[in-house]
Amino acid sequence: MPEAGDWRPSQLSDHESLLATLEDVLILLRGYVLQA
């Protein structure tokens, strides 16, 4: 698993980076909902 600051490789385009960020956010939100 990559380091916390390395989740966005520099070779990714801005669009791909945005999608990756949205996926991370959705995963985190899903985790909070399941724990609620």
Image: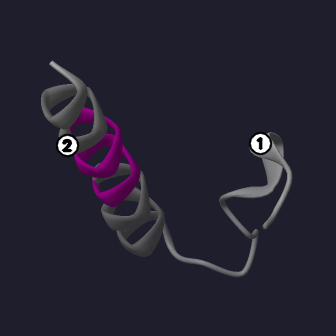
Colour scheme employed for the rendering of this structure: one colour
Circle 2 is placed at which residue position? 30
Relative to 19, is 9 on the left or the right?
Answer: right
Q: Quadrant of residue 28?
A: top left
Q: Residue 25: x percent and y percent?
A: 32, 41
Q: CA distance from mark 2 to mark 1?
A: 19 Å
Query: For the C terminus, which image quadrant?
Result: top left
Tell whether position 27 is magenta. Answer: yes
Query: Which amino acid type is marked by label 2?
Result: Arg
Give the residues drawn in magenta, as a range: 23-29
Query: For the N terminus, which image quadrant?
Result: bottom right
Vertical arrangement, residue 29 with respect to residue 3, above or below? above
Residue reaching furthest top? 36
Q: Nearer the viewer, residue 25 or 9?
A: 25
Relative to 18, is 2 on the left or the right?
Answer: right
Relative to 25, is 2 on the left or the right?
Answer: right
- 2 or 1: mark nearer the eye: 2
Q: Residue 29: x percent and y percent?
A: 23, 34
- Tag 2: Cα neighbours inside 10 Å, few (<14), some, or many (≥20)? few
Query: Which amino acid type is marked by label 1?
Result: Ala
| N-term-proximal mark, 2 vs 1 | 1
Q: Residue 12: x percent and y percent?
A: 60, 78
Say which element carries label 1. Answer: helix
Label of residue 15 in the image: none
Q: Nearer the viewer, residue 32 or 15?
A: 32
Q: Residue at x 19, y 43 (%)?
A: 30
Tell whether position 25 is magenta. Answer: yes
Circle 1 is placed at which residue position? 4
